[in-house]
Amino acid sequence: MYERFYGLRVRPFALNPDPAFLFLSRQHAMALTLLEYGIASNAAFGLLTGEIGSGKTTLLRRVIRELGSQVAVGFVSNTHSGFTSIHRWACSVLEIVPADDSDVALYEALVDSFIREYSRGRRTLLIVDEAQNLSIEVLEELRLLSNVNSERDVVLQILLVGQPELRATLSRPELVQLAQRVSIDFHLRPLTAVETGAYIQHRLVAAGGRPDLFAPQAREQIHRLAGGIPRLINQLCDMALVYGYAGAQRQIDLQLVLQVLSDRADVGALPVLGGSVPVAGVASHTGG
């Protein structure tokens, strides 16, 4: 809609986790390095947590894209509170067909696949996103599944990804054996104000646009109101570009961002982490 007006090839702040737009802040770069190291060093279990919208899935997509053919990857992304067993989902994402639908057949098919891949020089990586939704029973099932590994050979690696409450779950006494197997561990925190500004500029340039399309004060205000959470930053920036396009405004300034926030707050459509929206003194959005 607004891409041509602003000289953009694509929307720079779309919410889909596109690794082409991954912004490597200091902590995102560290998380990426640890994930890559964990996979390369045969870590049996890894853990990545962060608040909703902190960029976990985008990081995962980057890791998967760079693995190449040396690792068979299964990505479980639709966990929920009714999730009762990992075996069926693991078979599905790894495209494994068991002999029948029984629990024993599912388990045997998984183990056979892990060993078969290993004999071909490939390990299997099972990534479980939104793992905070998993019950203690399912998490314990994952630990037992990892017993296919021996002291010498790692045929299955498991990466648990989720929101901060996953850490509280893993600290429970019932899961001490699983927690002790986690050798790669990182928690993503919100972006700083400086990182938020660089994040906005990075995504604009990646989309073919000008890095100064958002004025410095606009970037600072977006950081305050989005709390440094990339997904909320994207929502605010995308809507600001729509408003700017509607008013034929070539640069997104502070007043325009405040107008976006004021309008959104009126209908309660956008979570705001940085406090109340400063409505007083906001100019009407008339373009120019």
Image: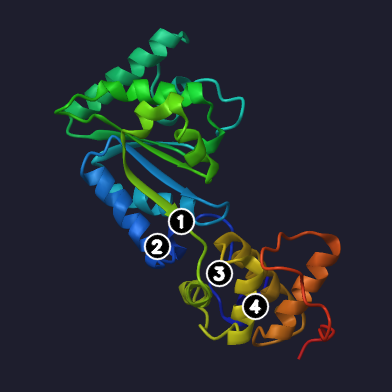
Given the image, on which type of amino acid does mark 2 rest?
Answer: Gln
Give yes or no for contact between labels 4 and 3 (Cβ–Cβ under 8 Å). Answer: no
> Which label sits in the foreground, 3 or 2?
2
Number of numbered discs present? Answer: 4
Q: What residue is shown with label 1?
A: 188
Residue beneath label 4, please? 221
Q: Amino acid at mark 1?
A: Leu
* Residue at left offset 29%, top offset 47%: 67
Residue at 49% across, 77% down: 194
Q: Nearer the viewer, residue 243 or 131?
A: 131
The secondary structure type at the circle numbered 1 is strand
Residue 222 position in % (x across, y down):
63, 74
Specify which label sits upstream in the sequence, 2 or 1: 2
Labels 2 and 1 touching (C-beta < 8 A)? yes
Q: Earlier in the sequence, mark 2 or mark 4?
A: 2
User: What's the distance in space between the residues labelled 2 and 4, CA to CA?
Assistant: 22 Å
User: As shown in the figure, which amino acid type bears the numbered disc 3?
Assistant: Pro
Give the labeled residue for mark 3: 12
Q: CA distance from mark 2 to mark 1?
A: 7 Å
Visible residue check, residue 221: yes
Residue 143's disc number? none
Cα distance, mark 3 to mark 2?
22 Å
Describe the element under mark 3 as helix, strand or loop: loop
Which residue is the site of mark 2? Answer: 27
Does residue 231 appear to the left or right of 94 in the view shown?
right
Tell me where residue 108 appears, x and y as whole percent. 34, 13
Tell me which numbered mark, 3 or 2, is placed earlier along the sequence.
Answer: 3
Query: In percent of the image, x 78 and y 77: which residue is there?
Result: 278
